[in-house]
Image (cartoon, rainbow, N blue to C red):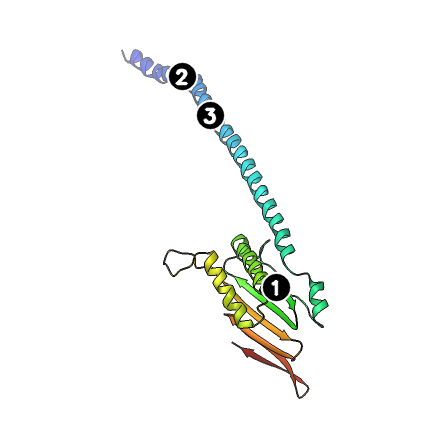
Amino acid sequence: MLTGTLYYYNLEPSRKLTVALEERPVLLVKQSSELKEKNDKILTANEELTVLNEAVNKQKNEILDSITYAKKIQAAMLPPEQYFHEILNDVFILFKPRDIVSGDFFWIKHVNQYVILAAADCTGHGVPGAFMSLLGISFLNEIVQRREITQANQVLNELRKQIRNSLRQHGQAEESKDGIDMAVCVIDEKNKTLLYAGANNPLYLIRDKNGAPELTEFK
């Protein structure tokens, strides 16, 4: 009786081990199937990400190409530096846009005895600012070159009217608040005078005083 009992208890762990070993291949097959399923999902997700990334890069390149082409249009609207040298002596231009296209612009025209210069900073950067700069340049050409308005304050006032009309700014809360900060200088070559008008942009005048440069700010 004692021997049989010992024999029974000695065989029980062996039987459990046999059952476990028989079930192990089934478990491994199940785990392998689950891993394969997860791997297939990962591969599918990677393929989808690759397709999406290619689409994003294509769209990005198309947008970049458009903006780069817009830069050429904007550059063509700006007066060339050579034109400045033809009108004025000892002049230079410092123009460093932050983006490919810029909301800043410079402008010059020679009408009769007057040289009209403008330096402007439009609201917004990049593409929105560039749109505003094209508006500003076009309106200045119309005001000064076609209508021959040559007084600095009148140029600014007319430009303000044109901007407000084109953007439909009539004092409503929901309307566009875009605009242009600008400094306008008019050099009267005949009378040797300089007139200045500014919209949120001061004038810095450097003159010789007793052999030393003197800086004066006009707001």
Front residue (pair 35, 70): 70
| Element marked by disc 2 | helix
- Image quadrant in which you'd find residue 60: top right
Tag 3 near tag 2, CB within 8 Å = no
What residue is pinned by disc 2? 23
| Dot 2 amino acid type | Glu
Query: Image height check: is 26 above or below 74?
Result: above
SS of the residue under disc 1: helix
Give how far across and how far down residue 62 sits, in percent.
58, 41
* Label of residue 35 in the image: 3
Residue located 55% across and 70% down the image: 183
Above-or-below relation of 56 to 101: above
The tag earlier along the polypeptide, 1 or 2, is 2
Disc 1 versus disc 2: nearer the observer: 1
Residue placed most toward the observer, 171 or 205 = 171
Q: For mark 1, what is the residue?
A: 145
Question: Looking at the picture, how far across and down is residue 202, in whole percent?
Answer: 54, 73
